[in-house]
Amino acid sequence: MQTETLPAMKPIGFVRAPYTATSEVPKGCGTTHTAEGVLEILPEYQEGLKDIEGFSHLFVIWVFHQSEKCELVGTPPTDDRPHGVFATRSPYRPNPIALTVVELISREGSRLHVRGVDMLEGTPILDIKPYLSSVPAEKLKRGWLAEAEKRKSP
Ligand SMILES: C[S@@+](CC[C@H](N)C(=O)[O-])C[C@H]1O[C@@H](n2cnc3c(N)ncnc32)[C@H](O)[C@@H]1O
């Protein structure tokens, strides 16, 4: 596909989250995201939520809309060594697209109550998909992150 034929994207909704600044979002080794939030889907896309209630977890694809730079190599909060952007979950990417797995708590019309948000209040949502992992835990390799966690553990 030629770049000039890429489709224009528009938000399907916005995140209601307890965080208004990036410094408020928990970071670093061993962080688990337990904050609750709401995915508010725009009325014109509500029909697309049909049957979503049956899934326990969702992939949320969203935009780092407050990210103003791109760093091809950077040092993440989980390590003191630099890594390539495509080997991290850095907000400083050529295309500022993010992916978060959240737990679906309940649905109220076009509002999805979820647990596990790591995005800011007002973040635009591009897409939602059911989370279906088929990779067995024993086959997963965590790369530099496993090494960083080992170095930091007491
Ligand atoms: C490390 S990124 C990971 C995001 C997502 N889970 C992923 O893997 O693509 C999460 C960080 O992005 C920053 N962030 C959250 N929402 C943002 C937004 N709307 N614009 C820019 N930065 C944001 C916060 O500092 C947060 O700690």
Image: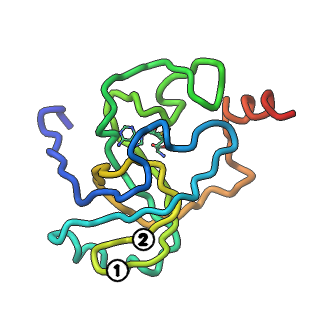
Which percent across, then down, holds residue 127? 31, 57
Q: Mark 1 and ligand 1: say if the CB distance to the nearest ligand atom is below 8 Å.
A: no
Tell me which amino acid carries mark 1: Glu
The N terminus sits in image quarter: top left
Residue where numbered disc 1 is placed:
108
Residue occupying the point 31% across, 33% down: 95
Residue occupying the point 17% across, 71% down: 43
- The residue sitting at the right extreme is 154
Residue occupying the point 39% across, 63% down: 129
Q: Say what secondary structure mark 2 lies in.
A: strand
| Ligand 1: image quarter | top left
Residue occupying the point 18% across, 51% down: 10
Of residue 4 and residue 70, the one placed in the foreground of this image is 70
Which percent across, then down, holds residue 42? 20, 66
Tell me which amino acid carries mark 2: His
Which percent across, then down, holds residue 112? 38, 71
Q: Relative to residue 4, is residue 72 drawn left or right?
A: right
Which percent across, then down, holds residue 65? 29, 39
Q: Please rate how many residues cluster around mark 2, counting C-alpha atoms within 10 Å: few if below 14, some from 14 to 19, many from 20.
A: some
Asked if marks 2 and 1 touch (Cβ < 8 Å), the reply is yes
Place residue 130 in its image quadrant.
Answer: bottom left
Distance from the alpha carbon under mark 2 to that under mark 1: 8 Å
Counting residues from the N terminus, which is met first, the one under dot 2 or under dot 1? Answer: 1
Residue where numbered disc 2 is placed:
113
Q: Relative to residue 135, is residue 102 drawn left or right?
A: left
* Residue 112 sits above or below residue 95 on the image: below
